[in-house]
Image (spheres, rainbow, N blue to C red):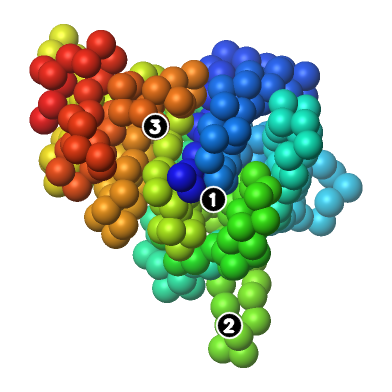
Amino acid sequence: MRVVVALGGNALLRRGDRPDAAVQLTNVQAAVAALAPLARQHELVITHGNGPQVGLLALENAADTSLTRPYPFDVLGAETQGMIGYWLLQSLQNALPGRQVCALLNQTLVSAADPAFHDPTKFVGPVYTREEAERLAAERHWTVKQDGPHWRRVVPSPDPQRVVETRLIRLLLTSGAVAVCAGGGGVPVVRDEHGRLTGVEAVVDKDLTAALLAEALDADALLLLTDVPQVMRGYGTPQAQPIGRTTPARLRAEHLPAGSMGPKAEAACRFVELTGGLAAIGALGDAQAILGGIAGTVVTPSGHHPQGQALTGPRHNDTLEI
């Protein structure tokens, strides 16, 4: 099978972790340990988030008095792709001796007319109290919004149209390599009237880019791996229930939060609707079980396994069906 995996932020930094390089490398090594069995059995593409890392670089840039102005977000995105790609590349090479692995810097084409440029929604960087966020917004001309009990900086998040290097990624897969690419959703670029590419101040949602890339690569499955075992209906309420198997229409009807699980659900739905394949959301440590249909929230056109076996959540609990 050809499998595209989108690693959530927990693959690098868990809530409460200090953003030290050693901490992130340890987390990457744990993530690779969970993914290596998939790489041994399938063609594998790995994408990853970069929200905390790009936010940290933005803070460092803003505080650097030697700069005339901070580096733009497309450049910061490229920097984090290189850093995180290096960690994943090296860890995969160590876990898969003899296997070719490539970490590729990617650009993601977006539309200059996307309304997201007028309504920033993508959270980046650390969390703040409301007072801290409002002070920083005034000092640094940021836009800030509430993220659960905290406040964070937001930047535009236009819809991805195409990963520019898609053909190159396909070549890597057909050669037998594991491809690490589209980090942080890819470096956002637009094409001008002369056909030339130029970067823009934005962050593309990594899960939507992963879905777009998976469709373009004719992938059989898209795994969106995070730090929760399943999508929850009524998350945070006494009536919360895990969703084990579902269809795109039913998952969309859950109206999941836009700032957390919503983009993952939308990415899963888009991939399944366009390809008829399998998409799933679940815990990184359950990657193999999720692909096998016995863990996570699995989305297919019918809500059943592509080979005809009903998909269930953990312990084959049929009450999870929606």
The type of residue carrying mark 1 is Gly
Is residue 103 visible in the rendered structure shown here? no
Callouts 3 and 1 close, C-beta under 8 Å:
no
Q: Marks 3 and 1, how far apart in space?
A: 22 Å
Image coordinates for residue 75, horizontal then vertical, percent: 71, 55
The type of residue carrying mark 2 is Asp
Q: Which residue is mark 3?
A: 291
Image coordinates for residue 17, horizontal then vertical, percent: 62, 15
Query: Who is closer to the viewer here, 144 or 245?
Result: 245
Q: Which residue is mark 2?
A: 192
Q: Which residue is mark 1?
A: 185
Query: Who is closer to the viewer here, 112 or 317?
Result: 317
Quadrant of the rendered structure where residue 50 is? top right
Q: Is residue 208 left or right of residue 168?
A: left
The type of residue carrying mark 3 is Leu
Disc on the earlier residue, 3 or 1: 1
Q: Which mark is residue 289?
A: none
How many C-alpha atoms fall within 10 Å of the one at disc 2: few (<14), some, or many (≥20)?
few
Disc on the earlier residue, 3 or 2: 2
Q: Marks 3 and 2, how far apart in space?
A: 40 Å
Image coordinates for residue 155, horizontal then vertical, percent: 51, 49
